[in-house]
Amino acid sequence: MALTLSEKAKAVKPSSTLAITAMAKELASKGIDVVGFGAGEPDYNTPDNICEAAVKAIHTGFTKYTPADGTLELKKAVCDKFLRDNNIKYEPSQIIISNGGKHSLSNIFSAILNPMDEVIIPSPYWLSYPEIVRLNDGVPVFVRAGREQGYKVTADQLRNACTSRTKAVIINSPNNPTGMMYTKAELEAIAEVVIEKDIYVVSDEIYENLVYGDIAHVSIASLNEEIYKRTITCNGLSKSYSMTGWRIGYTGSSREIAKLMGSVQSHQTSNPNSIAQKAAYEALTGPQDAVYTMKEEFKRRRDYIYDRVSGMKHVCAVKPQGAFYLFIDVGKALEMSYKGNKVENLATLARQLIEDFNVAVVPCDDFGFPDHIRLSYAISLQQIEKGMDRIEAYLETLV
Ligand SMILES: *Cc1c(COP(=O)(O)O)cnc(C)c1O
């Protein structure tokens, strides 16, 4: 037997955003003032009350194994949260606490997929979805939703994409990278297809608290009993409470699915960090003012960044309703020339922006849209302003 390696592992695509991030870091280390729009996490510290709960957990010896799928205390808090915020009724036996939202997604697909099962992924999509599906032996099936339809798939598109192999569809609202949200009516139409085709819906609601008032967040599982049975609701503490480093995610699902996810997790990671679980309990049950403050600030930034980009040449964007990203169509800019050469593709555009204008943006080839970039506004308003001036200056030079 030769020393071969796993074909599955070798097929995982390394993230294309890393090249730009590395270049931004290198420039910054040389003392160059780089504006980074790449951040995929809130720029706030974890609120004090949450940190204190963690310190207390350490000092009171809450530093041992917990049940592999999370403490009963935290599961109960998650049930209360689901009922209070999402109008979904789950019992603790339907909750699995994991090591972050991404880990929850991985658990979900390990519990529902058999080899070659298809998972419908509306495109643009968060770049980890197809990789997580493939790692669990599934086949991603992309359904394109362009700017003309607000980057949201329709129920009819989903119906047409279903085959006898379709196992699930992923809905992410508010969305990364577009910031778009599905309305209640749109979710109702999607739910009808899911029930008709008898498939699962994986509802990634990690950005539910970062919504800016245009559309209310609705959890698809709350719509009716039939869709409830077919939904796995996925969420986590990372984005709402600025707890990306703590690694706590959770799911609500049928008992059957929860049981499978629990057994998989019990062998893969055992329990999520005990200290982080105490912190998560405080986050979900303690005062929520920090969430509100953060959201208000994000709303100010969204309004500013959207207005600025709307006024720029050769690009266009749809106003985001949630999350902290602006998804920009740069298709026209790619057709134009910079310093005598056609820009042509996102890698070139991103390189010109970072090298000549010191702005880092995320090229969205790996999000399914090779003519869009993503800007995160999880940076200060002053930084956003400076970055906008630079991007505008770049676009002005294109002919
Ligand atoms: C950030 C994010 C997650 C989860 O992140 P974790 O850090 O693993 O909790 C899940 N889905 C989307 C779309 C995200 O952007």
Image (cartoon, rainbow, N blue to C red):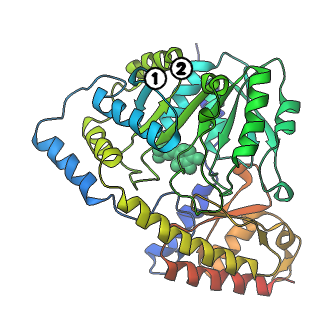
| Image mark for residue 364 | none
Q: Position of residue 27 (x, y in %)?
A: 51, 74
Question: Residue at position x 39%, y 24% from top?
Answer: 92
Q: Position of residue 313 (x, y in %)?
A: 81, 81
Q: Position of residue 392 (x, y in %)?
A: 71, 84
Verify CB contact (< 8 Å) between mark 2 and mark 1. yes
Question: Residue at position x 81%, y 40% from top?
Answer: 143
* Residue to which mark 1 is pinned: 94
Q: Is residue 182 left or right of residue 74?
A: right
Q: Is residue 391 visible?
A: yes
- SS at circle 2: loop
Instruction: Give whichever of discs 2 and 1 has the lower sequence position.
Output: 1
Q: Position of residue 141 (x, y in %)?
A: 78, 33
Relative to 60, is 199 above or below? Answer: above
* Residue to which mark 2 is pinned: 254
Near-viewer residue (68 or 298): 298
Q: Is residue 127 left or right of residue 75?
A: right
- Quarter of the picture containing the C terminus is bottom right
Relative to 390, is 96 above or below? Answer: above
Kindly identify the amino acid type of the residue bearing the numbered disc 2. Ser
Picture quadrant where residue 226 is located: top right
